[in-house]
Amino acid sequence: MTPPFPQLDYLVIACHPDDAEIGCGGAILSLKAQGAKVGVLDLTDGEPTPHGSPDIRRRETEAATEILQLDWRGNLGLPNRSLVADLESRRLVATMIRQLRPRVLLTHYWADAHPDHVAASALVDAARFWAKLSKTDMAGVPHQPAKILYFPSMHLRLHLKPSFVLDVTPYHERKMQALACYHSQFIAGRPATPLTIFDDIIARARYYGWTIGALYGEPFLCREEIGVRDLRQLS
Ligand SMILES: [Zn+2]
């Protein structure tokens, strides 16, 4: 990844290619429809998997990126299956935050069965703090995103109590199109009959949509309070 980097409004930091799409594909499309600049930083290439390869994953990611209309997408090349929130990884992620300067970060919910997802969440927490440091040789400028929003892209089946649910009804179909780009992960070698991974993703979107009186919703958690400027926006 070489400069110049665009200045982003929102940066999704996800462990594996396809996690951003699962966890917040609808939010990305919603933000893009409102004119925000949105990027995704994938931490690993997600390989090895039973039906994937680095080349296949790269092509799938490019196709999904096109559908999401992202302003920027990069891959940090950290080790899949053995991601660790160590100092060197923190430095790499913090450097990307200092260069892309997003107002808000989105990343994995902090609890999961997948150790990479847990490490990614911790890594983003620490890198957000490091990104604002002065008197450092990290590239970019000191920058602290105002919030981290956490999305479930999970291997645990938990009932989460979200901080808020975003109505993604107008964007649900395109989110599913973006997910379908990841043929090696969701379709190859898997039964085509219910319950497919897509059935589960749609059911969760419908469930969280139900909680706010919408057709489809995406849940987000935040450790800090969420400010609201306009009560008429509540649903
Ligand atoms: Zn993942």
Image: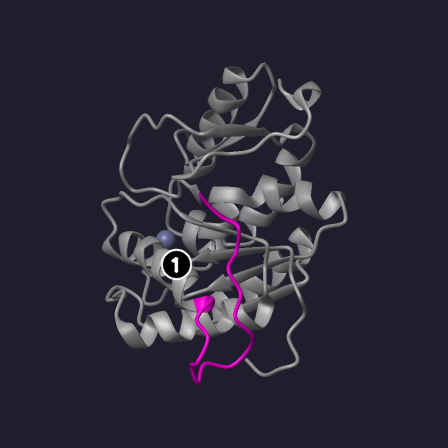
Q: What residue is rendered at 31% in x and 53% in y?
A: 117
Type of the residue with mark 1: Val
| Scheme of colours in the image | one colour
Asked if residue 197 lies in the magenta stretch, the reply is no
Q: Is residue 171 left or right of residue 143?
A: right
Residue farthest along the front direction in this orientation: 135
Is residue 126 depicted above or below 111 in this figure? below
Q: Nearer the viewer, residue 5 or 155?
A: 5
Is residue 150 depicted above or below 115 in this figure? above
Q: What residue is rendered at 45% in x and 29% in y?
A: 163
**x, y percent for residue 165:** 52, 28
Q: What residue is rendered at 40% in x and 61% in y?
A: 129
Which stretch is magenta? 131-149
Q: Quadrant of the C terminus?
A: top right
Q: How many marks?
A: 1
Q: Is residue 77 visible?
A: no
Magenta segment, principal secondary structure?
loop
Q: Quadrant of the N terminus?
A: bottom right
Q: Can residue 3 be seen in this view?
A: yes
Asked if residue 137 lies in the magenta stretch, the reply is yes
**x, y percent for residue 126:** 34, 61
Q: Mark 1 points at which residue?
A: 124
Number of other residues with Cα within 10 Å of mark 1, as a class: few under 14, some 14 to 19, many 20 or more:
many
Q: Nearer the viewer, residue 73 or 146?
A: 146
Is residue 178 depicted above or below 88 in this figure? above
Q: Which of 174 and 106 is in front in this view?
A: 106
**x, y percent for residue 44:** 39, 67
Quick check: is the Cβ at mark 1 less than 8 Å away from ligand 1? Answer: no
Q: Which of 193 and 24 is in front in this view?
A: 24
